[in-house]
Image (cartoon, helix red, strand yellow):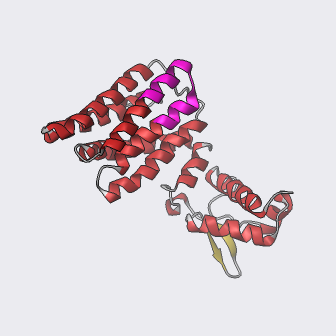
Amino acid sequence: MQRRGDLHTRVVNKLGAAIVDGDLAEGEIIDLDKIEEELGVSRSVTREALRVLSSLGMIVARHKVGTRVLPRAEWNLLDAQVIAWRSEGKDSDLQLHDLLQLRSGIEPLAARLAAGRLDAAALQTLRESCDEMEAAARTVDRRTFLRADEVFHSTILIGCGNELVARFGQVVVAALEARQHESRRAITELTPPSLELHRKLLLALERAGSGKAGQAAAQADRIARELVDLASVELGFEA
């Protein structure tokens, strides 16, 4: 027997995926009775799931009208859950392209700001992440490689000293996590130059504390931009 929390999660994921794929189209009134019959859940579980989707801007409930699917312009496209649904859906390439453009604006800025601000623990985390990525690339361990990449980039975003930029760290991590669902290979012929750029970015951030913070910050900005450009090419998009 499934626990209530498991049922709730299953309904949320089922409806969220149906909305992002257009199986529940914009403007459509959701048939709650049909959902409950198909998924074998109670009305209370369905209502809890709908509250989640409502908080994400995907649906709206109206008295005497029902629960209607909202257009994508209303969705919280930066929410990790919405990113995950779209990454497995029909418009995954569109989202991936948009996220890469977002990363190209956010990550170089974060790298510039992080220069001279990262403490010893953060720099050690970056070193360990680079080591893990290199080891995972040799053994073609996709999951470990992507996880270490997430840690590397989120460490810079969180440690950059700007709370607003750091908030986008959650979006970047969600974008990187979305690659777990990609059919494209995570480890390719472009992985070695990508690993080299990760090491160069780490070196620039380490040098930032040696009295040349301005020069190191500019270098970190440039390398971070190159990293996103290389990721774009690796995923089949123009830099």
Whether residue 237 sits left or right of residue 65 in the image: it is left
Of 129 and 40, nearer the camera is 129
Whether residue 219 sits left or right of residue 22 in the image: it is left
As for residue 136 lying within the magenta part, the answer is yes
Rendered location of residue 114, percent (x, y):
27, 46
Of 211 and 221, nearer the camera is 211
Answer whether residue 26 is visible to the viewer in this image.
Answer: yes
Rendered location of residue 163, percent (x, y):
33, 59
Rendered location of residue 12, percent (x, y):
68, 59
Whether residue 37 sits left or right of residue 69 in the image: it is right
As for residue 187 lying within the magenta part, the answer is no
The quadrant of the image that shows the C terminus is: top left
Rendered location of residue 112, percent (x, y):
24, 43
* Magenta range: 131-148
Instruction: Name the dominant secondary structure of the magenta segment.
Output: helix
Query: Who's the residue at 72% across and 71% down the image?
Result: 47
The extreme left residue here reads 211
Q: Quadrant of residue 19?
A: bottom right
Answer whether residue 232 is visible to the viewer in this image.
Answer: no
Q: Quadrant of residue 201?
A: top left
Query: Who's the residue at 57% across and 26% down the image?
Result: 141
Q: Is residue 55 above or below residue 78?
A: below
Q: Is residue 14 above or below residue 143?
A: below
